[in-house]
Amino acid sequence: MLQSPQQTNISFDGLGIAPRILEILDRMRFTHPTTIQHKAIPIGIEGKDVIGIAQTGTGKTLAFAIPIIQRLSQRKKGRALILAPTRELAVQINETFEKIAPSFGIKTVVIIGGASMHMQLAALRKNPRVIIATPGRLVDHIGRRTVFLADTNVLVLDEADRMFDMGFMPQIERILKVVPKNKQTMLFSATISGEVVKIAAAYMKLPVHVEVAPSGTAAEGVIQELFIVKKNAKKRLLLKLLQGYHGAVLVFSRTKMGAGRIARFIREAGHSAAEIHSNRSLNQRKQALEGFKSGRYRVLVATDIAARGIDVIGIELVLNYDIPDDTENYVHRIGRTGRAGHKGRAISFATPEQGGDVRNIERLIKTALPIAEHPEFPRERFTQHSSKGSQSRQFHGRRRHKQRRRKRPRRSESRGHNT
């Protein structure tokens, strides 16, 4: 989906977009750019480096797709490389490009793990001018010398903070070593992390900083609620809530095994449900997502791999069955609802011991989460020591996270192959 709630009241005219692209946008009935599109497109068309910070669901893909297509169409040589953290996001980006690029004879290719290497090699031999890739699989091709990036003149790092969170920094640095230094770089992210700053300082030339919403801003148009519930009552409350909603529901689990158990429980209760996480094959993930989009599955259970990259209109409810380990993922999760002008609702479950985790989220989004109650469940409160215990878990979690990242190059390459 190319539009979002954050639209401006002006048109795409006056942004430096070529008339031919404007005609395509008109035919697609896209008349008003979103705020990030309005700010970033002119800078991108000028060939300047861009750091775009915007909350999820604000139309960032079109903000870099238009400048790339326009600049490539004006020259016979050169190509664009777009890096994305997940297979789903890479496919979604390609779908946006395919709406405009074919009109200019520009071919694209998606390079992701889990897909046929043979088909990717066949597509690369056709000299695509836009390569959309996950870092792990692209490093595979670089190592096999089946892809050459010496003619790359535009590089995009999409959802950059998520790629760093997933441990892709070693692969990204390897990729950056084989692309030309003299190139345009556009970096888009929902939050600003230390790694984002590091990349900007080392590889970008006087980037123009465009920030639509403060880092951590929750999606507009989303009603948020919090249930304090004991762990052993979560499943019963989940079923009660599913009975009260009739539209599409996206449920987030903290772990892959948990996602599988929740999905099975929902199906056994008579609801249609699918699951999507990194243990599922590419074909299984595609089928789950397509089934969710088509209405075959009313409920999709996912881990945070799907917090960004699922672009489905009309998700009625996002339900955080588990509070996310990474506080910032809360913003990305709830951004899956309330898209494209639709209203949405986000409900989170927190156990009585997770008061500190909830307060961390509230500090990030700068608002208190309204506490809801269900008449069939006893009223629970956060325990007196929940703040201290939660902060201690968060502290030790950060220490373990940092220790893992010091050892991560080998693990992350393996993870990259599966992404």
Image (tube, grey):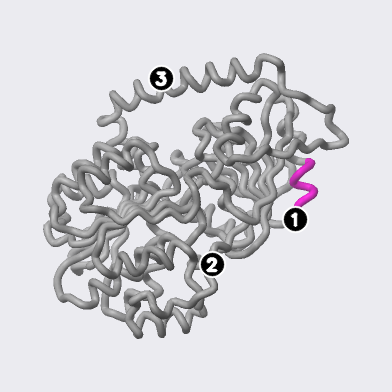
Q: Mark 1 or mark 3: which is in front?
A: 3
Q: Residues within 10 Å of mark 2 (few under 14, many from 20)?
A: many
Query: Looking at the magenta stretch, what is its main secondary structure?
Result: helix
Residue 256 vs 297, above or below: the answer is above
Q: How far across and how far down the image is residue 291, in percent?
A: 57, 58
Residue 227 picture quarter: top right
Q: How far across and how far down the image is residue 383, in percent?
A: 71, 18
Where are the magenta residues, as a range?
240-246
Whole-number angstrom distance, CA of label 1 to CA of label 3: 42 Å
Q: Secondary structure at mark 1?
A: loop
Whole-number angstrom distance, CA of label 2 to CA of label 1: 28 Å
> What residue is pinned by disc 1?
246
Q: Closer to the camera, 77 or 244?
A: 77
Left or right, 359 with reference to 167: right
Left or right, 217 with reference to 164: right
For badge 1, the amino acid type reads His
Q: Mark 2 or mark 1: which is in front?
A: 2
Residue 208 vs 382, above or below: the answer is below
Res 7 label: 2
Q: Earlier in the sequence, mark 1 or mark 3?
A: 1
Residue 6 picture quarter: bottom right
Whole-number angstrom distance, CA of label 2 to CA of label 3: 40 Å
Determine whether label 2 and label 3 are within 8 Å by CB.
no
For badge 2, the amino acid type reads Gln
On the rendered image, what quadrant is the C terminus found in? top left
Q: How far across and how far down the image is residue 18, in percent?
A: 32, 81
Q: Secondary structure at mark 3?
A: helix
Q: Secondary structure at mark 2?
A: loop
For badge 3, the amino acid type reads Arg
Q: How far across and how far down the image is residue 40, in percent?
A: 37, 63
Queried whether the magenta region covers residue 343, the answer comes back as no
